[in-house]
């Protein structure tokens, strides 16, 4: 029994101080989050399918959405930066993509002894494969 004017968490109805139950929906004044959700679904079934947020929020909040894309973007930018690098410190700019593409980067290193094009193709395929697997893992979560 709150000693203040309170808003019902189930129906958003306004109530007088010291009221034990909501005047609008007759739900108790003190409820847990699970009880609030259960009452909302039973009293307002048309609202059950309502989306709380927009499509961009839902996309970014799913591991299958933001994780593979951010991984692919960061790795691609780092690979392009390492490829465009010139000078003595080029090896350092390849460290981050090499870590992000493990274990494929090790295979690419070995393929570099055969052909530079083969080594680069392995890295590009590694980026696609890792992005695909991150998306598959995210869908299972």
Image: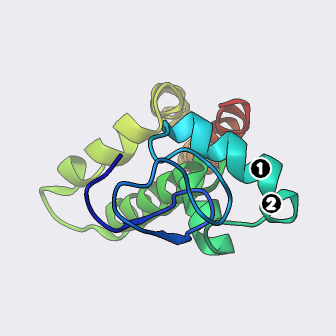
Q: Are marks 2 and 1 in contact (CB under 8 Å)?
A: yes
Q: Residue at x 27, y 67 (%)?
A: 85
- Is residue 78 in view? yes
Depth check, front residue: 103 or 29: 29
Depth check, front residue: 50 or 80: 50
Q: Name the secondary structure under disc 2.
A: loop
Judged left or right of residue 132, residue 91 is left
Q: Position of residue 71 (x, y in %)?
A: 49, 51
Judged left or right of residue 138, residue 116 is left
Q: Position of residue 77 (x, y in %)?
A: 41, 66
- Is residue 125 in view? no
Depth check, front residue: 114 or 26: 26
Judged left or right of residue 139, residue 59 is left
Q: Residue at x 46, y 29 (%)?
A: 102
Question: Residue lying furthest right in this view?
Answer: 46
Q: Quadrant of residue 23?
A: bottom right
Residue with the mark numbered 1: 41
Compared to residue 69, the image places residue 38 above or below, namely above
Q: Position of residue 44 (x, y in %)?
A: 80, 60
Residue with the mark numbered 2: 44
Q: Residue at x 35, y 35 (%)?
A: 99
- Disc 2 crowd rating (10 Å Cα; few below 14, some 14-19, many 20+) is few
- Disc 1 crowd rating (10 Å Cα; few below 14, some 14-19, many 20+) is some
Query: Could you tell me how far apart the alpha carbons at marks 2 and 1 are, in whole angstroms?
Result: 5 Å
Depth check, front residue: 121 or 46: 46
Q: Position of residue 63 (x, y in %)?
A: 58, 45
Q: Name the secondary structure under disc 1.
A: helix
């Amino acid at each position: 029994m709150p000693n203040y004017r309170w808003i019902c968490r189930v129906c958003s109805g306004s109530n007088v101080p010291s009221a034990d139950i909501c005047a609008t929906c007759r739900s108790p004044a003190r409820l847990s989050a699970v009880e609030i959700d259960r009452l909302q679904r039973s009293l307002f079934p048309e609202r059950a399918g309502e989306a709380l947020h927009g499509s961009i929020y839902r996309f970014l909040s799913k591991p299958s959405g933001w994780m593979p894309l951010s991984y692919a973007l960061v790795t691609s930018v780092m690979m392009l930066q390492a490829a465009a690098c010139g000078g003595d410190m080029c090896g350092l700019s390849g460290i981050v993509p090499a870590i992000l593409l493990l274990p494929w980067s090790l295979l690419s290193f070995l393929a570099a002894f055969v052909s530079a094009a083969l080594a680069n193709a392995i890295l590009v395929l590694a980026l696609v494969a890792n992005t695909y697997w991150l998306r598959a893992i995210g869908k299972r979560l």
